[in-house]
Image (spheres, grey):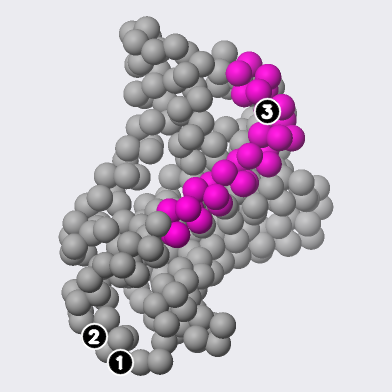
């Protein structure tokens, strides 16, 4: 446990000093400042205004931006250390492989989640002082969704890092995975349904295995409980899960997917050639 904590703190310190962390923090901090400054709290969508309207927009932007930042920055972790010869020194130190692997993942989780979360706090505080109603339910669920999505893509990143032979291959595959998940949000599956090559229920079920789709649909459900915006697919989701169970599914499923990916990555890392 001591080794794990030390590795975790070391990775946090290294990440904070890295340029990507500064850019990452500025992106999300800047998003909230611009959304608030441009008067988004005064606009209205499907009956939502104030801080609820701002959080809706912020969470949708986070869904597109955070995964690619997490993937690209994290896949450099193991693949980059292997190219740099870090493992040769690691094997000579009294640090277990499990403590090093999981310490790096937990440390990276804090560095990718905290900027996204902290960016929401000043707006919530300022909005409360300004007299806006604070949507605590939406804030709680959005925070839970972000935790789950961060962990999910961290697990996928660690798996890619252990399988890739070089940093370039790891980054290329990470970008391909992000692009594929974005395409599977709507475009490809809508095309399959229109061509009648698959049963709609099957296509929608496969789509809901996409963590980005789960995140997107659950975030929409908080302000559109009937999921009118996604059309007929809402009937399958609501009949199968119901509102409450789907929100729970949106938190639990990405977290489990990230954990399974990380475990597979660790097993591959432990059994592979470190040199």
Q: Earlier in the sequence, mark 2 or mark 3?
A: 2
Asked whether, in this view, residue 43 is left or right of residue 9, the answer is: right
> Against 146, is 158 above or below?
below
Spot occupied by residue 146 in the image (x, y as percentages of width and height): 57, 52
User: Could you give the CA–CA distance between mark 2 and mark 3, rounded to whole angstroms?
Assistant: 50 Å
Q: Name the residue under label 3.
A: 241
Q: Sort mark 2 into few (<14), some (14-19) or many (20+) by Cα contacts within 10 Å.
A: few
> Against 253, is 158 above or below?
below
Query: In the rendered structure, which segment of residues is drawn in magenta?
Result: 235-263
Q: Residue at x 46, y 36 (%)?
A: 210
Q: Which residue is drawn at 54% across and 62% down?
A: 113
Q: Residue at x 66, y 23 (%)?
A: 240
Secondary structure found at label 2: helix
Spot occupied by residue 185 in the image (x, y as percentages of width and height): 43, 31
For the residues carrying marks 1 and 3, which lies nearer the camera in this image?
1
Spot occupied by residue 45 in the image (x, y as percentages of width and height): 64, 30
In front of the other: 71 or 158: 158
Q: Name the residue under label 2.
A: 88
Spot occupied by residue 99 in the image (x, y as percentages of width and height): 46, 78
Secondary structure found at label 3: loop
Q: Residue at x 31, y 56 (%)?
A: 160
Q: Which mark is residue 5?
A: none
Q: Which mark is residue 92?
A: 1
Asked whether, in this view, residue 195 is left or right of residue 106, the answer is: left
For the residues labelled 2 and 1, say whether their Cβ atoms are less than 8 Å apart.
yes
Q: Earlier in the sequence, mark 1 or mark 3?
A: 1
């Amino acid at each position: 446990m001591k080794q794990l904590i030390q590795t975790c703190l070391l990775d946090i310190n290294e990440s904070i000093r890295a340029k990507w962390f500064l850019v990452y923090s500025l992106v999300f901090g800047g998003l909230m400042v611009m959304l608030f400054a441009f008067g988004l709290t005064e606009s209205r969508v499907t009956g939502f205004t104030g801080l609820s309207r701002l959080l809706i927009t912020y969470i949708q932007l986070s869904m597109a931006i955070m995964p690619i930042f997490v993937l690209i920055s994290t896949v450099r972790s193991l693949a980059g250390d292997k190219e740099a010869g870090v493992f040769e020194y690691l094997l000579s130190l009294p640090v277990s492989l499990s403590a090093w692997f999981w310490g790096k993942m937990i440390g990276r989780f804090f560095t990718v989640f905290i900027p996204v979360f902290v960016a929401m706090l000043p707006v919530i505080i300022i909005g409360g002082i300004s007299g806006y109603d604070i949507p605590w339910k939406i804030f709680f669920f959005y925070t839970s969704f972000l935790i789950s999505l961060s962990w999910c893509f961290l697990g996928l990143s660690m798996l890619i890092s252990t399988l890739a032979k070089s940093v370039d291959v790891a980054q290329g595959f990470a970008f391909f995975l992000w692009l594929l998940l974005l395409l599977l949000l709507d475009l490809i599956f809508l095309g399959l349904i229109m061509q009648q090559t698959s049963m709609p229920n099957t296509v929608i079920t496969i789509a809901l295995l996409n963590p980005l789709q789960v995140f997107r649909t659950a975030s929409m459900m908080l302000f559109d409980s009937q999921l009118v915006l996604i059309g007929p697919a809402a009937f399958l989701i609501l009949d199968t899960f119901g509102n409450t169970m789907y929100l729970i599914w949106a938190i639990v499923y990405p977290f489990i997917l990230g954990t399974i990916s990380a475990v597979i990555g660790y097993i591959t890392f432990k059994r592979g050639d470190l040199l």
